[in-house]
């Protein structure tokens, strides 16, 4: 492709509304343009990278026995009513009516549609398993679309769904997809980690997010330094955390009501009393399916809603509102588990974090809310003065916590971008949608499902987050829109002719190349080549050409060497082959 033909509107200035580097560079390198919040035009170079990734997805999924289908983006509400999600899905689901007044939505995901298809077309155990995928546009009316393609509203997702006769089959498929995802992201040259993730209402442990490690990632993950365990902080099992002041605790003390005027947060109360915040107890009240739960964690740590929901086996959770607290007789800002009047205790269940219960029962004196305005209790001991209806791990995990899996190693904290997700679904959709099969004995049973998502644009953005420098993008060969750029460095005809000759040879050798045939200064061409991030740059200048040489430069390593004009195309081909493992 000739640069003069290419639509690649590069920009010098960093766009003001782009906070993360991948978003900035995708705009600056002319890969995408915003149309509306979270909705983008894909320009030729951006689309080429996306197509490269899609090709990798297709190859690896096909290798794992998956078949491609294409389902509609516009789906009848009917299907979503059957699964119950028409009611459950919040405002992220874009709903609309057709001219007859029938309800539709723009698909944010396709469990319903695929389950209905398989239900109608597959009847017998003989026709199972099936593993189907599509690469299709999705729409989610995200509350905060941001970071360009990383969190869009309209975006491309590879979504796959598997159907097996039983759990054993489905778990085997799950493992195959897990391996497949490892191959996919490895081929993209990404530094990533599969981490255990929350399974929502489905339970079990079979859910892994594939996280690309990057500072700008929206997800927090922890990894154990001693065993293999890595998980999202919403899920990571914590055995113990650092609790200060423990050693200073002497003989058991008794609860004392202490005035703490105007001090509500644990940090404020701790500072007021001259104690480490980890000696205070944080009380947060949630409403989980109509039950109020007071959740207690050490004051210097955060309660994790997802863990709370799982601990009490709830399905809908939110922080309780002011009026709900007042109605139950709780005093906002001064709540605690000790000396709760019976009438109040009857309306509130108590969930104690495991690190509180295990911090030395009967010994550690906590500071808790006084259950009356402007007061706290000191000297409140777990087991003696309060107990939990449930004790569970409900902390948001963090760096330095002791791993709950091996019980020995410490966690290190990382940020990640979730590019893929594999999920064991069981019969969550097949049961309500009656996606059944007849087993060997002719008994009708629901199929056992899994689902497997990859964010296509998000993966491209994640690759840029990991591979860039001050000058621009550094594409891994596998995702680069073009492998190579050829730059004639001046208006002299012999430069143009030589560049043209090299360009023709590269094309003949199957090296995807852009010839920068613009009438621009070398500086401009270099800058754009670096910004766009072509892995290989071949420049033809007067000086080198005198000795029959062109200059070959690698974007990633910045290695430069002079190569004979006749040999440079073949060398480039070799570099491409090596990088792609061909
Ligand atoms: P997130 O927690 O980031 O919102 P999710 O759990 O809602 O993601 P899934 O429903 O599992 O995501 O979707 C599968 C994949 O689709 C994700 O792993 C992610 O790569 C991608 N994805 C999800 N939402 C978006 C979005 N708004 N923009 C771009 N990609 C997305
Ligand atoms: Mg989401």
Image (cartoon, rainbow, N blue to C red):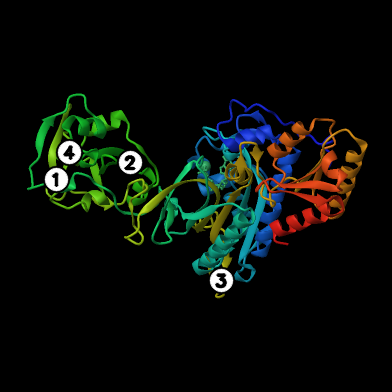
Please say whether residue 575 is visible from this viewpoint: yes
Q: Which residue is at 76% across, 39% downward?
A: 44
Q: CA distance from mark 3 to mark 2?
A: 48 Å
Q: Which residue is at 63% across, 71% downward?
A: 126
Please say whether residue 432 is visible from this viewpoint: no
Q: CA distance from mark 4 to mark 3?
A: 59 Å
- Label 3 beta carbon less than 8 Å to ligand 1: no
- Label 1 beta carbon less than 8 Å to ligand 1: no
Which quadrant holds the C terminus?
Answer: bottom right
Residue indicated by mark 4: 367
What is the number of callouts on the image?
4
| Mark earlier in primary sequence (3, 2) | 2
Say which mark, if any, is on residue 248: 1
Q: Tag 4: Cα neighbours inside 10 Å, few (<14), some, or many (≥20)? A: many
- Above-or-below relation of 364 to 206: above
Say which mark, if any, is on residue 302: 2
The spot of residue 516 in percent (x, y) is 82, 38
- Above-or-below relation of 3 to 16: below
Q: Tag 3: Cα neighbours inside 10 Å, few (<14), some, or many (≥20)? A: some
Q: CA distance from mark 4 to mark 1?
A: 15 Å
Residue indicated by mark 3: 439
The spot of residue 430 in percent (x, y) is 54, 57
Q: Which residue is at 58% across, 58% downward?
A: 181
- Label 2 beta carbon less than 8 Å to ligand 1: no
Pair 2/1: label in front? 1
Which quadrant holds the N terminus?
Answer: top right
The spot of residue 373 in percent (x, y) is 18, 27
Label 3 residue SS: loop
Pair 4/1: label in front? 1
| Mark earlier in primary sequence (1, 3) | 1
Label 4 residue SS: strand
């Amino acid at each position: 492709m000739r640069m003069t033909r290419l639509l690649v509107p590069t920009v010098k200035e960093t766009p003001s509304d782009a906070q993360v580097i991948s978003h900035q560079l995708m705009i600056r390198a002319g890969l995408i343009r915003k149309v509306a919040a979270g909705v983008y035009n894909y320009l030729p170079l951006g689309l080429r990278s996306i197509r490269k990734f899609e090709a990798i997805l297709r190859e690896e999924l096909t290798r794992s026995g998956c078949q491609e289908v294409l389902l509609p983006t516009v789906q009848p509400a009917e299907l979503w009513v059957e699964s119950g999600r028409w009611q459950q899905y919040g405002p992220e689901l874009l709903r609309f009516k057709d001219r007859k007044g029938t309800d539709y939505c723009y698909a944010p995901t396709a469990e319903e549609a695929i389950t209905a298809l398989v239900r109608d077309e597959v009847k017998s155990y003989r026709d199972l398993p099936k593993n189907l995928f599509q690469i299709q546009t999705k729409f989610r009316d995200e509350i905060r679309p941001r970071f360009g393609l990383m969190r869009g509203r309209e975006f491309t997702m590879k979504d796959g769904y598997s159907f097996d006769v039983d759990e054993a089959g489905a778990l085997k498929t799950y493992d195959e997809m897990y391996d497949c995802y490892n191959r996919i992201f490895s081929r993209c040259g990404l530094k990533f980690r599969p981490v255990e993730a929350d399974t929502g209402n489905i339970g079990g442990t079979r859910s892994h997010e594939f996280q690309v490690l990057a500072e700008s990632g929206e997800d927090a993950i922890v990894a154990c330094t001693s065993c293999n365990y890595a998980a999202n902080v919403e899920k990571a099992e914590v055995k113990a955390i650092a609790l200060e002041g423990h050693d200073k605790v002497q003989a058991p003390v008794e609860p004392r009501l202490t005035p703490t005027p105007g001090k509500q947060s644990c940090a404020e109360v701790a500072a007021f009393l001259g104690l480490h915040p980890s000696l205070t107890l944080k009380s947060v009240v949630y409403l989980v399916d109509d039950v109020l739960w007071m959740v207690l964690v050490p004051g210097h740590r955060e309660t994790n809603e997802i863990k709370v929901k799982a601990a009490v086996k709830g399905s809908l959770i939110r922080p309780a509102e002011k009026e709900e607290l007042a109605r139950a007789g709780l005093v906002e800002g001064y709540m605690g588990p000790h000396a709760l009047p019976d009438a109040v205790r009857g309306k509130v269940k108590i969930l104690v974090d495991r690190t509180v219960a295990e911090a030395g029962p009967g010994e550690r004196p906590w500071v808790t809310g006084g259950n009356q305005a402007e007061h706290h209790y000191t000297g409140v001991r777990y087991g003696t003065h309060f107990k939990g209806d449930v004790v569970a791990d409900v902390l948001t995990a963090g760096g330095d916590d002791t791993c709950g899996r091996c019980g020995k190693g410490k966690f290190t904290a990382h940020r990640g971008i979730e590019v893929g997700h594999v999920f064991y679904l069981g019969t969550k959709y097949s049961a309500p949608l009656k996606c059944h099969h007849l087993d060997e004995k002719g008994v009708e049973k629901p199929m056992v499902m899994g689902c497997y998502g990859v964010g296509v644009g998000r993966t491209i953005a994640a690759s840029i987050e990991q591979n860039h420098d001050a000058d621009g993008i550094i594409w891994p060969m596998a995702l680069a829109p073009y492998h190579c750029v050829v730059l004639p460095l001046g208006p002299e005809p012999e430069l143009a002719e030589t560049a043209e000759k090299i360009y023709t040879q590269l094309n003949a050798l199957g090296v995807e190349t852009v010839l920068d045939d613009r009438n621009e200064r070398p500086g401009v061409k270099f800058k754009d080549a670096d910004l766009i991030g072509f892995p290989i740059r071949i420049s033809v200048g007067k000086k080198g050409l005198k000795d029959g040489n062109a200059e070959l430069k690698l974007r990633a390593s910045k290695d430069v060497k002079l190569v004979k004009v006749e040999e440079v195309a073949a060398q480039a081909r070799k570099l491409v082959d090596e990088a792609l493992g061909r």
